[in-house]
């Protein structure tokens, strides 16, 4: 691998680390009618009902598949609920235990933790819903368990610094890499597996994948002659990407997520 990148810190960006104790409850959902989406939207807007440790919720609607390595049907929505320290019992009771209802099925519910140095957003984050050229990129990634520590190192040393530059330049809205700490519900019929979710708001026009974007962002920091093959080649042997989707913004009530966190590189 290439030499580790050591960028300067930027007070205008927030970097959330695992010891900041930010956790997210993610629900993969199939909403079968508009009324179900309306109920999901209303619930996300009313996120304050989960108490002061809740930092907000966001809801994304599937638009298209960017990359697919699975024959499993595509779900309709992903919902992320952010909490400080731990997910509240009330949230798990409402969103997981009592969640199945007419018109909607929860296919998977999981607890996510931030990937080291790879959860980046502006401190003045206001969402991307008013940027019609942007869509929410959601990568569902499966890292082989024996490579998890090595994968985290690669994210910390290369992907995080590159993402920080791209968020700072407003090329990306945010870059939020999260890994599965626990799956607390899974529909028996869900025939797809992952242990990482990466969220990024981007303009798909001219977008050729994160590898190209990261290489461009890091070009001036890499040693002379080094490039994508040096910094990222090992990711292919560590992981697969069973599904990568582009999504519409339904609710972005997550403006408080980056407040109070450390400055980002």
Image (tube, helix red, strand yellow):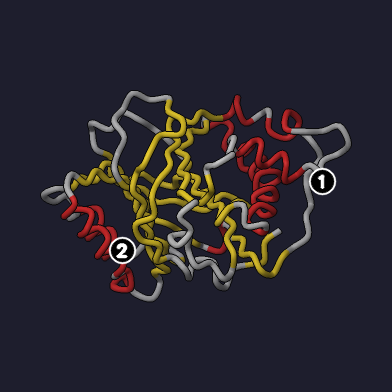
Q: Secondary structure at mark 1?
A: loop
What's the distance in space between the residues labelled 1 and 2, CA to CA? Answer: 40 Å
CA neighbours of label 2 inside 10 A, class few (<14), some (14 to 19), many (20+)? many
Give the camera-side residue of 103 and 187.
103
Question: Quadrant location of residue 39?
Answer: bottom left
Q: Position of residue 3 (x, y in %)?
A: 81, 40
Residue occupied by mark 2: 44
- Is disc 1 in contact with disc 2, using a CB cutoff of under 8 Å? no
Give the camera-side residue of 203 and 29.
203
Residue occupied by mark 1: 221
Residue extending furthest toward the left: 102
Q: Which quarter shows the N terminus? A: top right
Residue 104's disc number:
none
Give the camera-side residue of 179 and 208.
208
Residue extending furthest toward the bottom: 52
Q: Secondary structure at mark 2?
A: helix
Name which of mark 1 and mark 2 comes first in the sequence.
2
Q: Position of residue 218 (x, y in %)?
A: 75, 44
Q: Position of residue 180 (x, y in %)?
A: 44, 45
């Amino acid at each position: 691998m290439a030499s580790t990148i050591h960028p300067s810190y930027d007070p205008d960006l927030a970097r959330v680390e695992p010891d900041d104790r930010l956790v997210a409850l993610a629900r993969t959902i199939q909403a079968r009618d508009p009324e179900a989406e309306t109920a999901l939207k209303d619930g996300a807007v009313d996120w304050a009902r989960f108490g002061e440790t809740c930092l907000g919720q966001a809801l994304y609607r599937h638009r298209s598949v960017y990359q697919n390595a699975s024959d499993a049907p595509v779900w309709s929505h992903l919902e992320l609920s952010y909490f400080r320290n731990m997910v509240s019992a009330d949230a798990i009771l409402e969103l997981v235990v009592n969640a199945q209802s007419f018109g909607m099925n929860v296919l998977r519910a999981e607890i996510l933790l931030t990937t080291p140095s790879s959860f980046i957003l502006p401190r003045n984050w206001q969402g991307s819903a008013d940027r019609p050229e942007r869509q929410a990129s959601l990568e569902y990634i499966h890292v082989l368990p024996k490579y998890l520590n090595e994968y985290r190192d690669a994210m910390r040393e290369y992907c995080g610094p590159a993402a920080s530059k791209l968020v700072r330049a407003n090329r990306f809205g945010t870059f939020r890499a999260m890994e599965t700490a626990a799956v607390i519900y899974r529909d028996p019929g869900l025939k797809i597996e992952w242990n990482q979710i990466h969220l990024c708001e981007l303009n798909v026009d001219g977008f050729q994948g994160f590898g190209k974007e990261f290489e461009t962002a890091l070009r001036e920091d890499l040693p002379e002659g080094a490039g994508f093959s040096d910094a990222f080649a090992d990711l292919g042997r560590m992981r697969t990407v069973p599904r990568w989707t582009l999504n519409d913004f339904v609710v972005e009530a997550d403006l408080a997520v980056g407040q109070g966190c450390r400055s980002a590189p």
